[in-house]
Image (cartoon, helix red, strand yellow):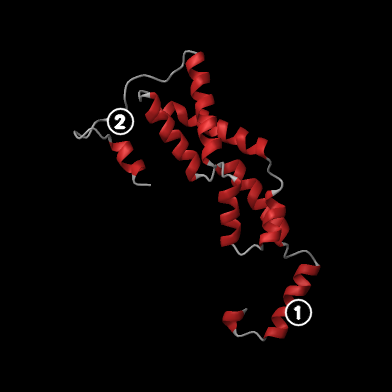
Amino acid sequence: MARRDVPDDVVTTVLDRFTEVGLVDDLAYAEMLVRSRHADRGLARRALAHELRAKGISPELAEQALDQLDGDDERRTARELVARKAAGTAGLDRQRRRRRLAQMLARKGYPPGLALGVVDEVLADQDAAGDGGFGTPSHADRDLGDGIDADDAAFDDA
């Protein structure tokens, strides 16, 4: 409306009416965004808070929306993400696997302590199950000749 030079008093009246009839509900929007991004993309509270801020949601409403996630939800989601991605690290040594999986969680907003703890748990579970994931290296794991493989070069710069 601002781009169309609608007078401020008209904008206020229209937005107040929209809010009154439930067409504009920032809290409902924020809660929906938190639920969907956490479920679909596995984003943690920190990444979700950043996204809500970027969308103009007030800190108070963002906190209310984020309250629907607890530490157990984040831990469970992180564990599912790591278990799913661990297969893609097959053929790598344990430290490289650990670093890559923890970096994946960090990009999704998980705190370092939680990320490393979950990665260590999943890798230990796989080792105990005899599924250490050590197979044939993939194309991305080939050595570039300087002791750094193609995958690590991309992650170390992040």
Give how far across and how far down residue 52 sits, in percent. Answer: 61, 57
Residue 4 vertical position relative to residue 78 in the rendered view, above or below: below
Query: Would you say 61 lies left or right of 145 here?
Result: right
Q: What is the x, y in percent for residue 67?
A: 71, 48
Identify the image quadrant of residue 71.
top right
Q: Which of pointers 1 and 2 lies earlier in the amino acid sequence?
A: 1
Q: CA distance from mark 1 to mark 2?
A: 60 Å
Q: Residue at x 60, y 85 (%)?
A: 5
Element class at badge 1:
helix
Crowding at label 2, few (<14), some or many (≥20) Cα neighbours within 10 Å?
A: some
Which residue occupies the extreme left position in the image? Answer: 145
Residue 7: % across, % down: 67, 86
* Kind of residue indicated by mark 2: Asp
Q: Quadrant of residue 117?
A: top right
| Marking on residue 13 | 1
Q: Which mark is residue 141?
A: 2
